[in-house]
Image: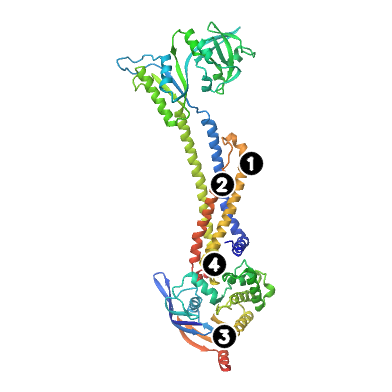
Amino acid sequence: MIRIEKLHKSYPIGKDSLHVLKGIDLHIKEGEFVSIMGSSGSGKSTLLNIVGLLDSHDEGDYYLNGQLIQNLNEKKAAILRNKFLGFVFQSFNLISYKTALENVALPLSYKGIARKERLKIAQEYLEKVELGPWAHHLPNELSGGQKQRVAIARALATKPKVVLADEPTGALDSTTTDSVMGLLKDINDEGMTVFVITHEEEVAEQTKRVVRLKDGVIISDELTSIGKAKAKAL
Amino acid sequence: MFDLDRWREIFQSINKNRLRSILSGFTVAFAILLFTLLFGIGNGLQNTFKKEFAGDATNSVYIWAGRTTKPYKGLQSGRRIQFKNDDYEFLKKEFDNEIQFISPRIQRSANVTYKTKNDTYTIRGVYPGYDVLESISMADGRYLNLLDLKSKLKVVVIGQMVEKDLFNGLSAYGKNINLGGIIYKVIGVFTDPGGDSDERYIYMPYTTMQQIYGGNDNIGDFGMTYNPKLSIDAAIAFGNKMKRALQKRHDVSPNDQRAIRVNNYAEDNRQVSTMMLGLNILILVIGFGTLIAGIVGISNIMVYVVKERTKELGIRKALGASPGSIITMIMLESVLITALAGYLGLVVGVGILEYIGPSLEKYFILNPGVSTSTVVAATITLITAGIIAGYLPAKKAAQIKPIVALRAD
């Protein structure tokens, strides 16, 4: 699903440049539940942004769903994001003047789905994250956990190939963290590829595979206990 | 290409971000309001100008003769130039195309008596039709006619003030009055928009005057109107040509400014039209200045709007919005607000002009208002401005990488 080979990325800082990713090799198969661990500055967010087509890489190859990503203009990137990727951000990134339902329906409108149809789909996904009764509330009327569940519903609504979650629990307390992680686990169980970035061990432990990043290189890549159990079961 | 979904998005965005929408709308509405008011008031000033000056600046030309100030062709300076009847015939023949109407004038003052009352008035001997030149209108009786002229009748037309002074409020029409010892019959009483002093003249056929006061064919000066079809430049050229022709006839040096003088209203007309042009330019500058201020205002606000929405645009892009759809969204919003607010400003501006217009007349502002074409042009300019003002920041926003946009707060 995601194949990354010798990926490099640097950011210009004044006259110098900061080398953030120094040759990353990563292969994520369909249906995996992977977490990227690392302290801040390790390059994990940069990696997610490149995987999510929100940013471009300098060197190396990136294949998304078998397609080589190169010379992507904004328009093509937008189409690919809409088709293959669903995003969950730490700060939720809901549009403040739209209701939960409209937020979930928004990516569907960029797919060209008619209003009636997309509101129906959005309602289904809200039910799925157990927020059906909150459909017509604005984001600021929802709790942090509820907001993140709306964001997850939004990420799922377009039936993407991969859900990318950047510190999805970073702004949540432990109870809501568990419920959000449980939700991500559920959708993974349904076959969705889920890619989580986090710096919390407890969060990483709930995924099936942990990739540890330090100073722009991968230092370890192993299955978690859950992942091992799952692998055994197969 | 009417996309209900797209409009729904725009209306939601405008409606849910009311402060922002109202602020940007206010800038535009205010600019257009000012534009309308200033343009309207400028037009009002121009209307006054037209009425006061253009109406008065007729196509009149007057020619006087004086004494020469320069020796010429062996003749000494200080010689008195005297127009004669043949000068009149000459001008009429020579400038047939340029002259609309010409009248010789002979002017002298005389002691005028009716019964016991008497006073001194200026008597003018003229050609019938001279009334047009002075914008005279008859209050009683008639003006001089060709028969009076040919028969050299002793008839006069007197001004209203003469009647008032000498006739004790009674009608002067048909009465006989005594002008320096000779009895004339009053055949008409006139009024003159020029006021009291112009209503103290007494007119009689110039032929009568030549016969009685001098027994010669001397003429004092000429009053005429030039062909209204002449352009101002042509009319001024005509005046100069006439002056040179008369100088030649009377052996006057071409450099002599005093011997023959021409007062050509066309020159005043030129001044008036130059001033009108100046006023026009002023109005245009004010109008476009206001519009440009408005355009700059919208542009600033659009830049701000895009900046404020950067994060939202980043979210939309992460969710799959194409740059094109972002540009369209921002521009349609900008154009919609601009058009609506601009229209509101126009309506309010026109309303204010209508309401306060009549009370401005004492400040030399007559019928202030803007023409439909100006209104349409201003609206189109604004919508264009809205498009441009929206396009540049929208394009920039659409080019921002979503990751940069998402980081914005």
In the rendered view, would you say B106 is above or below A204? above
Chain ID of residue with mark 3: A
Kind of residue at badge 4: Leu
Quick check: can you spot residue B136?
yes
Q: Residue at x 56, y 40 (%)?
A: B41
Place residue A84 in its image quadrant: bottom right
State the SS at label 3. loop
Q: Nearer the viewer, residue B33 or A141?
A: B33
Place of residue B8 in the rendered image (x, y in percent of width and height, measured from the top left)? 62, 63
Q: Residue at x 55, y 36 (%)?
A: B47
Most extreme residue toward the left is B74
Kind of residue at badge 1: Tyr
Badge 4 is on which residue? B313
Most extreme residue toward the top is B181
Mark found first going from the N terminus, 1 or 2: 1
Badge 1 is on which residue? B355
Badge 2 is on which residue? B375
Between the residue at mark 3 and the residue at mark 1, the CA separation in whole angstroms equals: 74 Å
Place residue B359 in its image quadrant: top right
Q: Nearer the viewer, residue B109 or A89?
A: B109
Place of residue B317 in the rendered image (x, y in percent of width and height, measured from the top left)? 53, 70
Badge 3 is on which residue? A207
